[in-house]
Image (cartoon, rainbow, N blue to C red):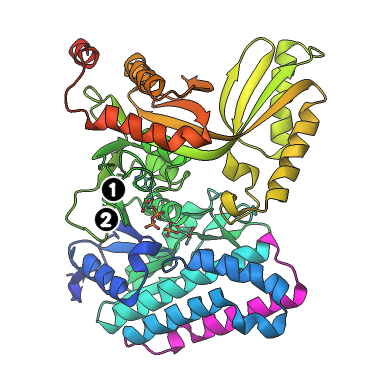
Amino acid sequence: AAETLGGIGVGGGDQLSVVMKFGGSSVSSAARMREVAGLILAFPEERPVVVLSAMGKTTNLLLLAGEKAVGCGVIRVSEIEEWNLIKDLHIKTVEELALPRSVIHTMLDELEQLLKGIAMMKELTLRTTDYLVSFGECMSTRIFAAYLNKIGVKARQYDAFDIGFITTDDFGNADILEATYPAVAKRLHGDWIRDPAIPIVTGFLGKGWKSGAVTTLGRGGSDLTATTIGKALGLREIQVWKDVDGVLTCDPNIYPNATTVPYLTFEEAAELAYFGAQVLHPQSMRPAREGDIPVRVKNSYNPKAPGTLITKQREMDKVVLTSIVLKSNVTMLDIVSTRMLGQFGFLAKVFSIFEDLGISVDCVATSEVSISVSLDPSKIWSRELIQQASAPIYMQNQELDHVVEELEKIAVVHLLQQRAIISLIGNVRRSSLILEKAFQVLRKSGVNVQMISQGASKVNMSLIVHDSEAKQCIKALHQAFFEDDVLTEVEEEALHMS
Ligand SMILES: Nc1ncnc2c1ncn2[C@@H]1O[C@H](COP(=O)(O)OP(=O)(O)O)[C@@H](O)[C@H]1O
Ligand SMILES: N[C@@H](CC(=O)OP(=O)(O)O)C(=O)O
């Protein structure tokens, strides 16, 4: 028979049923942690695995503290502003939750030692950076598990790198390896059967299979931790709790009139994330799709809102456009063959150069003798964990110079910077309608589209414009597709035809 712990029914025989992931904004303070505990307890019929990100902006603060430690000297480490903010936030949270300081004391000591080590070595490798940022998730989960136990809800903290999250050794952007699924399932399920307690797992982290060192899954990687656990355990549902009402029709920071998209397919969500919507980690849909486990995006600040439900299929008949996504600071390359190689030899060579340099391409357009590509900004500087906008400009340029140098052996290359990709995620069966409307809007706004990429994906059409015009375009497109009540004739016709 199921015993009840603090309102959550946990019977040893029952399977874990859902994964609930809470992002940094959901657990940014003691008050928020209390609310999150309340949210978990509000579903007493569930047996959740909880995945947490670092509190608030801790990951950014750790990165900045590390950068400062490189240049400040051991003695001044204690004065690093970001280190003090991290320390104060975690100590304050522990105190406000009336927990003993010992919950995070060792972690804070180790973190200070690490910053001193960085200061002493005057260098911060990618491997050390991952170890450094891991303290964020290691602390938030320890605090939250201790709090649940204190209020009588049995919980057990886990570091993902100790329970089978095996990854490649690409520090800062590691990929999860297949061996992770059986290992994580065995550990979490086994512990649950033996001694039921809500697992509280660190998001974002893994263990490199060769190095044995802590790795991170790329910014926002806790979403991927959650879907990986969902697939590993074959759970009923994966919930990702954010600070917005779900996936929205566009980034609310760009245009506040964005509204919630109630349903998405895995494919739509993956494209949306890949093309830059910060709301989901680009790789996070893969395990959910493979395990066919629904993902629900919910707002921890507004739990009553229905959120977004992401599943394998959905009714597409009435769908025209679902969401508009912007990827800024994109670099384009126009590569015109010098005809030293035949056409297929030319294309093969261009892509082998990208492969050799580890550079990902987002959009591609070709003619007989030329090829235009846009380069994924986060991938060009993937070795830089801090978001690309703040990556040192010399580093960006060095990497680009290298690409151009290699390509110039077989082609004339024009580098076009400060471009933006506007991705229209929607029903590609209505591509003519979507493009007609989009081009009408852009023409009225006086914007010239520099490249179009459509066809490879069933749900996405991409337009490249100049960065300086992009936000204005998003606003105008949003108004035309989502705010004009009256369907235009052409839309009605298309809907009738379907
Ligand atoms: N299309 C979109 N839908 C929803 N949120 C978006 C979208 N594009 C960008 N965002 C931003 O993503 C944020 C949520 O993602 P993230 O910060 O990773 O959440 P968390 O840290 O809670 O996991 C939102 O606060 C919003 O500003
Ligand atoms: N803390 C990590 C991982 C993460 O997923 O965070 P969030 O869920 O707050 O986006 C980051 O900031 O990248």
Mark 1 and mark 2 in contact? Answer it, CB < 8 Å: yes
Q: Which mark is residue 299?
A: 2
Q: Is residue 173 visible?
A: no
When asked about the image quadrant of residue 497, the answer is top left
Mark 1 sits on what residue? 246
Q: Quadrant of the C terminus?
A: top left
Q: Is residue 86 left or right of residue 110?
A: left
Q: Is residue 166 visible?
A: yes
Q: Hey, what amino acid is under mark 2?
A: Asn
Magenta stretch, residue numbers = 97-126
Q: Name the spot of residue 397 as percent of width and height, x first.
A: 72, 43
Q: Is residue 49 left or right of residue 110?
A: left
Give the residue drawn at x 40%, y 31%: 473
Give the residue drawn at x 35%, y 61%: 22
Say whether residue 108 is magenta: yes
Say whether residue 146 is magenta: no
At mark 1, the secondary structure is loop
Q: Is mark 1 within 8 Å of ligand 1?
A: yes
Q: Name the spot of residue 390 as percent of width and height, x first.
A: 59, 54
Seen from the viewer's position, the closer of residues 20 and 372 is: 372
Q: Is mark 2 within 8 Å of ligand 1?
A: no
